[in-house]
Amino acid sequence: MTETPKWLEQAARRGSERPWTLGAALDEYCRNEGLTREQLSSLLGCSLDSLAWLSLCRRPGPEQFAEDVSKIAERFEIDASKLAQIVRRVDAVAVLRRAINTQEEDPLLLAARDRAEERDK
């Protein structure tokens, strides 16, 4: 087994600051879902070292999303559908946040309020 380079963790952390990296999406997913890196690695079925290497990858592009996800998943031996779900969920939350910033009333709060009203009926 090869030894993990000492610089990997720092590189993954710095890379995650770049929105075009997969690391940025993975970090955002962890924040949104309240997960630790350990929990995320378990969800993806990979080691923390593999997660750090994965974080250095370019984020799948919209033009060839499925192909990019497949290649990344194959390279890191993770479930492609889980990776795709994570990236798509981060994208969806970002769109909702932008919508919130352009509207007076929060659509998430409206949905939650509607759901609570239905439950109380």
Image (cartoon, rainbow, N blue to C red):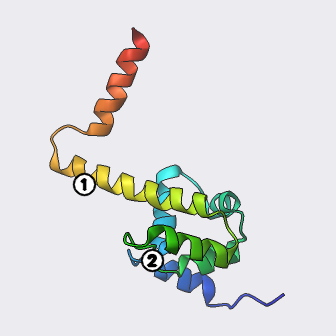
Is 97 drawn above or below residue 19 in the view shown? above
Is 78 drawn above or below residue 6 in the view shown? above
* Residue 63 on image: x %, y %: 37, 72
Residue with the mark numbered 1: 98
* Residue 87 on image: x %, y %: 47, 62
Whether residue 30 is visible, yes or no, is no
Quarter of the N terminus within the rendering: bottom right
Q: Residue at x 56, y 84 (%)?
A: 10
Residue 112 figure quarter: top left
Quarter of the C terminus within the rendering: top left
Amino acid identity at mark 1: Arg
Residue with the mark numbered 2: 21
- Give the total number of marks visible in the rendering: 2
Residue 76 figure quarter: bottom right
Q: Are there few (<14), some (14-19), or many (20+) residues within 10 Å of tag 2?
A: some
Q: Is residue 69 left or right of residue 78?
A: left
